[in-house]
Amino acid sequence: GAGVSQSPSNKVTEKGKDVELRCDPISGHTALYWYRQSLGQGLEFLIYFQGNSAPDKSGLPSDRFSAERTGGSVSTLTIQRTQQEDSAVYLCASSPRGLGYGYTFGSGTRLTVV
Amino acid sequence: DAKTTQPNSMESNEEEPVHLPCNHSTISGTDYIHWYRQLPSQGPEYVIHGLTSNVNNRMASLAIAEDRKSSTLILHRATLRDAAVYYCILRGNNAGNMLTFGGGTRLMVKP
């Protein structure tokens, strides 16, 4: 597709359940980033993938959060045993490798934990 | 990471030019200056980026000071659709070349 695609666009889950959020980056973009944005707040970096290198997980807030990227393309962010403080918009972005390129963001997944 | 400083908010009248300032006094020689904007209920959108020279594209212009310690995003004719939070970010040789978003400038456009 022409842009970064995220699914689902909205997810309501019960506290304690696991959720999976999906990101389809732009074809050929080697870098993929996950951010989250709580209501009225700024963007918080979560995790970064670059090609076949080990991901940078330094932003993950707890061990309940994990992500993988299969075949250098699609990525899945998994949150186990969701808590109410996990409620936020989860944004994925992709970029070609290198400093001289911009990010393209998806529209995000709005996660609500009830 | 080098930090940027932006005003929290600005107001503009529709169809007038808007100059959004950004200070980045600790910028390093390899840092690119990126601008993104986030419209209400949407993900951030790339606007423009530059290294040393001024840049123009269909959305905006980027004026970079000669010493690179500040820059200005110029919207030539503001429309109501330009009301958004504008982020000025330095993208450098940190791990992952990732973008670190600050608070940005909330631009309000009055009809």
Image: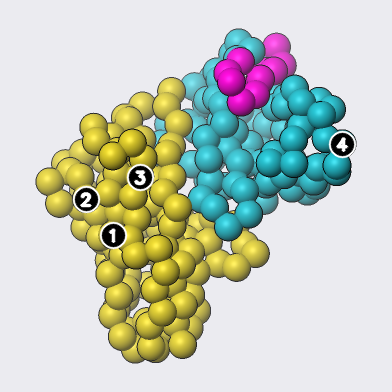
How far apart marks 1 and 3 lie (CA) works out to 11 Å
Q: Are marks 4 and 2 in contact (CB under 8 Å)?
A: no
Instruction: Tell me residue A113's x, y (percent).
Output: 44, 82
Q: Is residue A99 above or below residue A57?
A: above
SS for dot 2: loop
- Give the magenta range: B56-66
User: How many labels sit on residues?
Assistant: 4
Residue highlighted by disc 1: A22
The residue at which mark 4 appears reads as: B13
Which amino acid type corresponds to the residue marked 3 in the rendered image? Val
Give the image location of residue B12, x and y in percent. Answer: 85, 37
How many residues crowd mark 2 within 10 Å: few (<14), some (14–19), many (20+)?
some
Q: How far apart are the alpha carbons under marks 2 and 1?
A: 7 Å
Structural crowding at the residue carrying mark 1, measured as other residues with C-alpha within 10 Å and reported as few (<14), some (14–19) or many (≥20): many
- The yellow one among the chains is A
Residue pictured at 46% horizontal, 77% vertical: A112
Residue nearest the viewer, comparing A65 with B80: B80
Q: Which mark is residue A74?
A: 2
3 and 4 marks on the same chain = no
Is any atom of residue B10 visible in this view? no
Subunit ID for the residue under disc 2: A
Does the stretch in magenta take in B95?
A: no
Q: Nearer the viewer, residue B16 or A83?
A: B16
Tag 1 secondary structure: strand
Mark 4, mark 2: which one is toward the viewer?
4
What's the mark number on residue A4?
3
- For the residues labelled 3 and 4, say whether their Cβ atoms are less than 8 Å apart: no
The letter of the cyan chain is B
Q: Nearer the viewer, mark 3 or mark 2?
A: 3
Q: Would residue A38 be seen by someone viewing this image from the given angle?
A: yes
Mark 2 and mark 1 residues within 8 Å of each other at the beta carbon = yes
Q: Circle 3 sits in a helix, a strand or a loop, which is it?
A: loop
